[in-house]
Amino acid sequence: MSTMFRSLRVANYRIWFAGALVSNIGTWMQRTAQDWIVLTMLTDHNATAVGVVMALQFGPQLLLMPWSGLIADRFNRRRLLIITQSLMGVLALGLGLIVVTGVAQLWHVYVFAFGLGIVAAIDSPARQTFVSELVPDSNLSNAVALNSASFNGARLIGPAVAGLLTVAVGAGWVFLINAVTFAATVFAMALLHTSELRPQPRAPRKRGQLMAGFRYVAHRPDIIVVLIAVFLIGTFGLNFAIFTATMATVEFHMGAGEFGLLSSIMAVGSVAGALLSARRSRPRLRLVVAGAALFGVACGIAAVMPTYLSFAVSLVFVGLFSLTLMTTANAYVQTTTKPAMRGRVMALYMAIFAGGTPLGAPFVGWVADRFGPRWALGVAALSGILAAGAMLFWLIRYRSLRVRYRRGVVPHVQVHHDGDGRDRDPIDVETATREIAIIEATR
């Protein structure tokens, strides 16, 4: 088996991967159907309403982040995931039933989106960090990339199937099917060989642990600059539901099938980006910079595409560069964080990544309503350029980044800098907590 798929040599990871793939397909089906009913059934093509749904679904990750990360670091992640995946299945079932029976209103979708957001806030850091219990540390970066490939491979199937089912039998059945797919993850968790799991150090039960993740990150400037880039692009650039829905319906006057197809087409590039990341043995900051800049360029090109077909083709590159960026950023943060802190740091990462949506999605939706969907894509393009600029400034100013062209050497373009910051051990958070307590006690 090639190095690209080396994590699949581990039996537990294969079981996890299969269950997650089925569940991810259902998740993408629900996302597509949910955006469609809000845009066409419950409103008159109101992109702002789609943005509100996204804000309610992702907002809890920002609000609950300090507690969700500590929960992931303190409790058994396998048992925690069984609970959260089961609850999300129940929520999908409830939404499906009210849509099928024809009683759904916009506020119902808001309520279910908020409920799903609360459960997902607990699920996300546990799911992100559970991978470290499935594979050895040497394969962690590869496993993170394959998880992204699974999630975006599901995007190839889920939206297209959702579009066809919405036309054939209605959106309600899409939600009901998604409820069933959550059982795949629960079943996979039950099949895992628990004796072969690699339990990570647990957060101790003592004062100060809730804020320990913040203190840890505060002394890791390399992680901070990654989080800045993730915030800019996650908030203003990754609102794909708004971009594809409004471009398909408002700009090109297409139906549900063509709308679902756009997400699947973009997933082609996303899977390619994730698999290319899986080939790399070590995530690097320079790749995050390149991914951000190229994402901005790709969104700018997509914004000016004159036809549905040319726009669809441009989405392949939007997906490629967005996943290169996000997979590398995710793997960098996970692989350079101490195991006992990983849940809290990843909760902060996911809160910044998804928690910015309550700010960005309504704004991008308003831009699409007020000025048109092409200008909304322009906002995404600007977010990528600003993110790349922020990281470049840090690398040049604090890590002495230098780019040289040498004709007689391959590769001709060479990038040098004084490390990315991971080589500088951050302060020991537990020691710092004790020192603070001693200082306060002597006052």
Image (spheres, rainbow, N blue to C red):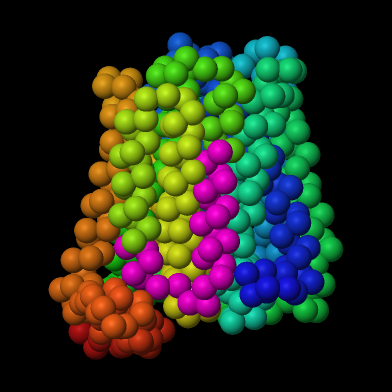
Q: Position of residue 371 (x, y in %)?
A: 26, 21
Rendering quarter of residue 104: top right
In the picture, the quarter occupied by the C terminus is bottom left
Rendering quarter of residue 435: bottom left
Q: Position of residue 128 (x, y in %)?
A: 57, 62
Q: Position of residue 299 (x, y in %)?
A: 35, 41
Q: Nearer the viewer, residue 425 or 84?
A: 425
Q: Total marks drawn?
A: 0
Q: Which contiguous range is marked in magenta?
A: 265-289
Q: Can the viewer see residue 397?
A: yes
Q: At 59% from the left edge and 29% from the top edge, which residue is drawn? A: 260
| 352 versus 250 height, above or below | below
Decide if residue 300 is on the left or right side of residue 268: left
Decide if residue 57 is on the left or right side of residue 197: left
Q: At 65% from the left edge and 13% from the top edge, which residue is drawn? A: 103
Decide if residue 303 is on the left or right side of residue 132: left
Q: Residue furthest front?
A: 408
Q: At 37% from the left edge and 63% from the top edge, which residue is drawn? A: 288
Q: Residue furthest left?
A: 397
Report the magenta stretch's main SS: helix
| 314 versus 69 height, above or below | above
Q: Position of residue 220 (x, y in %)?
A: 32, 76
| 334 versus 232 height, above or below | below
| 149 versus 360 height, above or below | below
Q: At 45% from the left edge and 11% from the top edge, which residue is drawn? A: 44
In the picture, the quarter occupied by the N terminus is bottom right
Is residue 226 covered in magenta? no
